[in-house]
Amino acid sequence: MVSLVPAFGGIPAGPELIIILIIALLLFGVPLVLVAAAVLYLTTRSDDETAAETTDDDRIAELEAEVERLREQVGDEPDEIEEEERS
């Protein structure tokens, strides 16, 4: 007589599928979330650095203009200042 039960137990359903989904979530979901968080963190961090560099560049240009304006008020030229420092 032939057995009606398959050799490998049949098609998984119910609790077996839930266990498979939990394992897949742990294997693929958690690392995927960690990689996405790292990319998001690095992206926001680079935006902050770019904004800081722009602010620094603007501040440097503003200070250079103020130094030039003060030199014009005093009447000293940059070459004259360097020659006085060498003497």
Image (tube, rainbow, N blue to C red):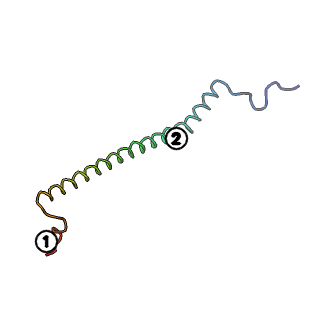
Q: Upstream in the sequence, badge 1 or badge 2?
A: 2
Answer with left or right where residue 2 lies relative to residue 42: right
Tell me the residue at 83%/26% (across/down): 3
Which secondary structure, mark 2? helix
Tell me the residue at 76%/32% (across/down): 8
Which secondary structure, mark 1? helix
Amino acid of disc 1? Glu
Mark 1 touches mark 2? (CB < 8 Å) = no
Q: Nearer the viewer, residue 79 or 86?
A: 79
Q: Residue furthest right?
A: 1
Q: Mark 2 — residue? A: 31
> Residue 52, position in %: x, y?
31, 47
- Other-residue count near label 2 (Cα within 10 Å), few / some / many at <14 / 14–19 / ≥20: few
Q: Quadrant of residue 37?
A: top left
> Residue 42, position in %: x, y?
42, 45
Tell me the residue at 32%/50% (across/down): 53
Q: Is residue 19 above or below residue 76?
A: above
Q: Which numbered circle lies on residue 84?
A: 1
How many numbered tags mark residues here?
Answer: 2
Q: Nearer the viewer, residue 28 or 23?
A: 28
Q: Nearer the viewer, residue 70 or 40?
A: 70
- Other-residue count near label 1 (Cα within 10 Å), few / some / many at <14 / 14–19 / ≥20: few
Answer with left or right where residue 18 lies relative to residue 9: left
Q: Quadrant of residue 21?
A: top right
> Residue 87, position in %: x, y?
13, 75
Answer with left or right where residue 25 lies relative to residue 47: right
